[in-house]
Image (spheres, rainbow, N blue to C red):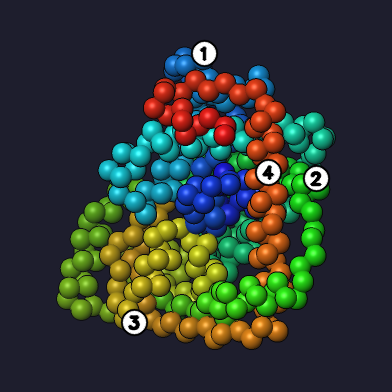
Amino acid sequence: MTTRGESIAAGPSTRISHAPRRRLALAFLGLLACAAPFAPPLGAQAVSGGGGFAALVNGEPVTYYELEEAVRRRILALGSRYPEELLGGQAEQLRGEILRELITERLLLQRCERDKIEIRPEEIDNWVQMKIDDLRTQDDSIQSVGDFFDRWEADFGENEEQARQQIRNNLRIRRLLDTKIYQQEYISPAELRAYYIRHPEQFSTESHYLFRQIIIPSDDPDVREILSAIDRDIAAGRDFGAMVAEYSRGPRAAEGGRYELTDKQLSSWYPPIPETLRSLPLGAISPPLRAASRIHIVQMLEHRPGRRLAFAECQLQIRQRLRNEREEVQRECFEEDLRQSAEVRVFLPASDTEHAQPK
């Protein structure tokens, strides 16, 4: 299950999903669409299926409202990377896969209830502040808790109460996995060196990207006129910094919209910005890039590639990667055990069901 926020919220790292195809990524910081359990509006239960239910998980419902909200958020997150017609054509499979993720989340949260795993409000506050501190290095408009939740609501349509509920769920699941499931196993020096030899491309200092960008809210009533004016200025060879000062609504417009990010920081931005910057020639200007609630136009100024790390410099990094791989296997086995012992009823149409049924 991918979580909302690597765009604003690279949500707590629950790593619930177990199918690589579902790590479709987002970036404000690494959150995608997974429904927060909040009450649907009056009438939402009357959609279709088992009394408005998409599924029953040990008697607990996943409503159609929750499912459709999760699908909406996933399409919002993926819409900047994939064309609308492709997403529309995959809607049935996407709905089934997201329901499967929601079922898995329900099972994990039910286990949290059984094991009395809870998260205190101050732990949520601490996690939010940690994300704000990280975001400040990349986006000057995120300075406060209010800024953080305003962006969350703009990107995902959830208010602060709903966002905090999702963060709480993710933190509970992470604690369940850390305390009940993950087992630290010894990793020998020979295993570390073998991994280093097999994956030399993974171990280098971080690349740095220096660029400028124009940021325009996608709901700006003048967005079409602004983009047309920018196109004309680019064709006329106007200085990009002057264009930033005139057109950008971003927090660094007065400083020419300049950003310097490491490759890791860049990866936390919404697609297609990371992919575009990494392939953009020096001095080139990108087409308009729609990323969640904003449109970006970027100019690449400088790329400083990283250097290859010696084995002695990256042993801790390799050890952590191997532990992550082993934890993923442990999590998949745990989730499969939960599914096998659960009573799950799915009410999706037949075309969706094969992607939703616990396997």
List the residue tagged with mark 1.
Answer: 51
When the figure is inspected, residue 127 is found, relative to residue 169, above or below; the finding is below
Residue 184 drawn at (x, y percent)? 80, 58
In this picture, residue 109 sits left or right of residue 135: right
**Residue 122 at least partly seen:** no
Secondary structure under the numbered disc 4 in the rendered image: helix
Q: Earlier in the sequence, mark 1 or mark 2?
A: 1
Please name the amino acid that badge 1 sits on: Gly
Element marked by disc 1: loop
Distance of mark 1 from mark 2, alpha carbons? 35 Å
- Whole-number angstrom distance, CA of label 2 to CA of label 3: 49 Å
Among the two numbered marks 2 and 3 on one chain, the one whose residue lies closer to the N terminus: 2
Front tag of 4 and 3? 4
Q: Amino acid at mark 2?
A: Lys
Q: CA distance from mark 4 to mark 3?
A: 47 Å
Residue located beneath label 3 in the image: 282
Q: State the CA–CA distance, disc 2 to disc 4.
A: 13 Å
Expressed as whole percent of the image width and height from the top left, the position of residue 48 reads 44, 16
Residue 191 placed where, x, y %? 70, 72
Q: Which residue is mark 2?
A: 180
Q: Earlier in the sequence, mark 2 or mark 4?
A: 2
Q: Is residue 17 visible?
A: yes
Between 14 and 236, the one nearer to me in the picture: 14
Quadrant housing the C terminus: top right
